[in-house]
Amino acid sequence: TDYGAALAWARDVCVGTHCAAKELYLFTDLQRSGLDRTPAEPLPADLDVHLVDLGQVYPENVAVTRVTPQGLSVRPGETVALAATVFNASRFALEDGPVVLSLGKEGRERVVRSSIDLDGGASGTVRFEVSDLDEGLWQGCVELEHEDALEFDNRRHVAVMVAPRLDVLLVDGEPGGSPFASETYFLETALRLAPPGDVYLDSPFEPTVVAVGEADPLTDLDDADLVVLANVAEPSAAGARRIADFVESGGGLLVFTGENVRAEGYREFASQGLSVGEIVGVGRATSLPWRLESWEKEHALFRPFNDPEHGDLRRLAFRAHTSVKPSEQARVLARFRGGGPAVIEQQHGRCLLYTSD
């Protein structure tokens, strides 16, 4: 190994960063071999260097290697369960090693203490439970309070988001003859992640479906966090006003278009400031389907798809889409091949139009 080149790389990283605290851990067996092959510039003066001797015959090191929550979602008042994995790299047994979980939010802290016994070279699990956490982001760490040769791996950070389910009101503009043919079937299934009537505990959404033609589906929005209009032909004037008040107070509006959506049906929406542009008509594919060509990669909506493992949005095919001329106050987040808008949002980000069903 060319240690000189490695130190030069570490120096460049530290010089290029704007972090207030800079630390370098050098793991070595303290042999001189390789140190003089590549000349290295002096390390920055504000860099704390930690030399870790790996050449000891009987090294002492115990590490917290993993912290795993029991579930992805925690509701206010529920018990938070976490499992911490501890590894004893030493040849000597660890007896009654203290392991501490600490979680804090807005100046408050919850601390749970436990302990573990480990033979040399063995791993073990410590389980923690914390009850009655209120809503918000709780941050902290699991730490093994043990002095050894490599103390920085004695701690592993963890964060727990405690939040209620988001109530999503799905307004189905074309219910269909069966649940599978309804406009909202696939969206509801994706949000619920369970068969109708069942609840998947880790789903952050609680969808409720109402069909156009029933009593005004927009009468009561008090319990909703998000309203979704799926191919709804003409929201009532009273409904548009209620949605405007709902959005103004912090609610979200997502509109999927379709064959039922026409400009004349959404004039009341425009008068309430809910429109993202002028509905021009329907663009239909002829020889080739419409496909997404570009999108805002850093927008929260599309950021997950920067990872190729999450799929390629360009593979999606559309037989038709609603042609929309965006307003000056709107922002186009995604476009079809040829430049037509696919996803448009209001500048304040509370209204989103998807120009397909």
Image (cartoon, rainbow, N blue to C red):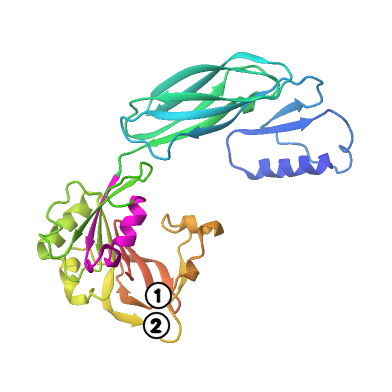
- Residue nearest the viewer, comparing 135 with 267: 135
Percent x, y for residue 245?
Answer: 17, 54
Report the quarter where the N terminus lies: top right
- Residue nearest the viewer, comparing 203 with 3: 203
Q: Is residue 187 above or below residue 249?
A: below
| View extreme (bottom): residue | 287
Residue ID at (89%, 35%): 33
Percent x, y for residue 246?
Answer: 19, 53
- Residue nearest the viewer, comparing 26 with 174: 174
The three-letter code of the residue at mark 2 reads: Ala
Highlighted range, magenta = 166-194
- Residue nearest the viewer, comparing 55 with 36: 55
- Give left or right: position of 119 versus 141: right
Q: Label 2, on which residue?
A: 285
| View extreme (top): residue | 96
The three-letter code of the residue at mark 1 reads: Phe
Badge 2 marks a residue whose secondary structure is loop
Q: Label 1, on which residue?
A: 318
> Residue 181: within the magenta?
yes
